[in-house]
Amino acid sequence: MAARPTLFTRGLSSLSQTTDPNSPNVSSPAEQRDDAKRNLFKTMRPLPTQHYWNVYFDRQAKEPKKEDDDSYQVSLEQLGTQIESVQDFWRYNNNTPVDQIKMRESIYLFKSGFKPIWEDRRNVLGGSWTFRVPKSAGPDFWTRVQLMAIGEKLQDVLEEGDTICGVGLSVRFNSHLISVWHRDASKSKSIDAILEAVLEDLPAELRPKPDNYFYKKHSDHPGFNPPPELKAVIDSRKRAEEAIAAANKQNENAKPAPAE
């Protein structure tokens, strides 16, 4: 006959330490249950995120950036330790007062290996959706977008071969600019799916109007300045996209006119 398994009780409160009802150490059943829950939670391992994430803070440069200057990267500072669990995320998020971030400053939550820089080797062919949100709604919107990122909800909607890089929040005069970055701006289905996923996740009171969000390739920004070795990659991609567009236009023109 198999031996009866031993009941695992380590870390739980000793509910039967005494049977004397007059003992001052006896807790009520409700208190005993609360103690048991607290001790159980202490023994539970943190819920890990699928990827590691880093938090970056971007301070406004005091002087305009020169073409041969690397000051942008210098102003980008990684905050705290790597986020590896849901508990790590809430610890960071609950202790980061978004309403105290100054004008023209930004905060980013990015996957380990990616930096919130357009010209970064792993971002250079990508783009981002940007949502202009009133400052009153910014913190709530920001938390929801971050949760969509670390919970892989944004990654799950992308085309094969595409990757979510991270999300960011930038402070402007009367609004927050909240962005979602992905790696491959040639994936049109990814672009549409990111927007749809964000809008579907938001409650009606937070959902921005169509004129308050836009998509842009990193290479289309006026300040985009990749190193020479990456510029060749971008030019090659651009030529390929132009060739595809020209072929599609030619096919459209070759279609017979509909019969009357």
Image: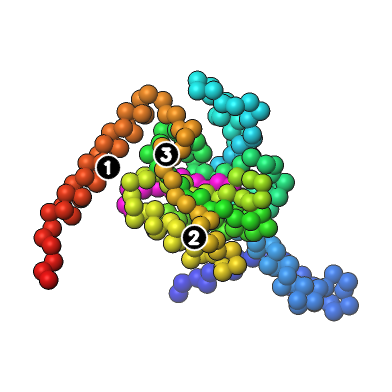
Magenta-highlighted residues: 157-169
Q: Point out the tag, 2 or 1, that comes first from the N-terminus.
A: 2
Give the camera-side residue of 2 and 165.
Answer: 165
Residue type beneath disc 3: Asp
Task: Please provide percent x and percent y for residue 105.
Answer: 64, 40
Q: What distance separates the C-alpha of mark 1 from that of mark 3?
A: 14 Å
Report crowding for label 2: few under 14, some 14 to 19, many 20 or more residues within 10 A (C-alpha).
Answer: few
Left or right: residue 121 compared with residue 109:
left
What SS does tag 2 mark?
helix
Task: Please provide percent x and percent y for residue 60.
Answer: 64, 34
* Residue in the picture at 13% in, 66% down: 258
Task: Please provide percent x and percent y for residue 30.
Answer: 75, 76
Residue type beneath disc 1: Glu
- Asked whether residue 246 is in view, the answer is yes
Q: How is the image coloured?
A: rainbow
What SS does tag 1 mark?
helix
* Residue in the picture at 44% in, 46% down: 216
Quadrant location of the C terminus in the rendered image: bottom left
Residue type beneath disc 2: Pro
* Residue in the picture at 44% in, 50% down: 215
* Residue in the picture at 32% in, 28% down: 232
Give the vertical position of 32 relative to 257 (above or below): below
Task: Please provide percent x and percent y for residue 205.
Answer: 60, 67
Q: Residue 39: which numbered mark, if any? A: none
Specify whether residue 164 is painted magenta: yes
Left or right: residue 242 compared with residue 260:
right
Q: Residue 210: which numbered mark, if any? A: 2
Question: Circle 3 is placed at which residue position?
Answer: 220
Q: Point out the tag, 2 or 3, that comes first from the N-terminus.
A: 2
Left or right: residue 213 compared with residue 236:
right
